[in-house]
Image (tube, helix red, strand yellow):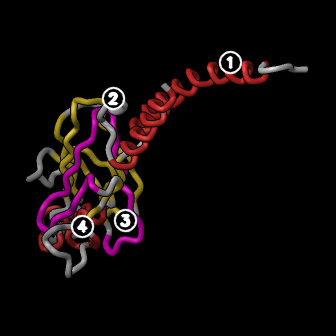
């Protein structure tokens, strides 16, 4: 049986125990949110062949967070991610088939590494991680070689890499995923919310 203010005293002790634990949890959650959420790119929409015919020169948002990648006709898609971050190449029900290869430069269409080879397909769900800083290049080579062409014969007029600028330039910053300031879009907003809650608990 409690008398006087004893219940309030116990509640205060319980709150004093919970607050540091909550701060630790929120800090860990903020770090994980930034580190674990890849930028999701609709890789098909980085191809001019998939863009609306009446699209204006401002381009099309093709990623989540939405501000990360904008596709402009005739140009490669571009994105910046932190070291240790990742990109998820995701699309389904595309009008055309697409593959995904690493290339040596923005101008190159010769694969140095294959993520999704052959003619590709109308859907894709592949995640590529970036453990080191630098600039990395990707392309779709559908129809560019006999191996990647429907029917087995390359056709330069339909080569996605050259004719439709189906390319991606990835800049990987030195700032690692999970470091302060590395969040953007959805994960960044989550981190800011966590920090706000943490500050309120101080």
Question: At numbered mark 2, what does the secondary structure look like: helix, strand or loop?
Answer: loop
**Vertical comparison of 177 with 87: above or below:** above
Question: At numbered mark 1, what does the secondary structure look like: helix, strand or loop?
Answer: helix
Q: Is residue 162 magenta?
A: no
Residue 33 in the image: x percent, y percent? 44, 38
Q: Mark 1 points at which residue?
A: 13
Q: Which of 138 and 154 is in front in this view?
A: 138
- Residue 45 visible here: yes
Q: Name the residue under label 4.
A: 60
Query: Which is more foreground, mark 1 or mark 3?
Result: 1
Stretch in magenta: 67-96
- Between the C-alphas of marks 2 and 3, the distance is 36 Å
Q: Name the residue under label 3.
A: 121
Neighbor class of circle 1 (other Cα within 10 Å; few <14, some 14-19, many 20+) is: few
- Between the C-alphas of marks 3 and 4, the distance is 22 Å
| Extreme residue toward the left, this view | 107
Residue 14 vs residue 168: left or right?
right
- Of the residues under marks 2 and 1, which one precedes in the sequence? 1
- Of the residues under marks 4 and 1, which one precedes in the sequence? 1
- Of the residues under marks 1 and 3, which one precedes in the sequence? 1
Q: Mark 2 points at which residue?
A: 179
- Between the C-alphas of marks 2 and 4, the distance is 30 Å
Neighbor class of circle 4 (other Cα within 10 Å; few <14, some 14-19, many 20+) is: some
Query: Which is more foreground, mark 3 or mark 4?
Result: 4
């Amino acid at each position: 049986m409690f008398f006087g203010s004893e219940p309030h005293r116990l509640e205060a002790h319980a709150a004093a125990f919970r607050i540091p634990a909550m701060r630790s949890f929120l800090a860990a959650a903020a770090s994980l949110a930034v580190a674990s959420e890849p930028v999701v790119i609709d890789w098909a929409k980085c191809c001019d062949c998939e863009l609306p015919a009446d699209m204006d020169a401002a381009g099309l948002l093709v990623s989540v967070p939405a501000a990360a990648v904008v596709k402009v006709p005739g140009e490669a898609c571009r994105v910046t991610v932190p070291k240790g971050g990742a990109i998820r190449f995701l699309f389904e029900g595309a009008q055309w088939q697409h593959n995904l290869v690493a290339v040596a430069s923005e101008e190159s269409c010769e694969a140095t590494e294959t993520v999704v080879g052959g003619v590709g397909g109308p859907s894709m769900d592949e995640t590529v991680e970036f453990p080191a800083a630098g600039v990395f290049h990707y392309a779709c080579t559908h129809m560019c070689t006999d191996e990647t062409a429907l029917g087995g014969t390359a056709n330069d007029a339909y080569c996605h890499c050259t004719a439709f600028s189906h390319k991606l330039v990835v800049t990987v910053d030195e700032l690692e995923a999970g470091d302060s300031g590395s969040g953007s879009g959805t994960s960044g907003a989550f981190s800011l919310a966590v920090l706000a809650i943490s500050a309120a608990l101080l």
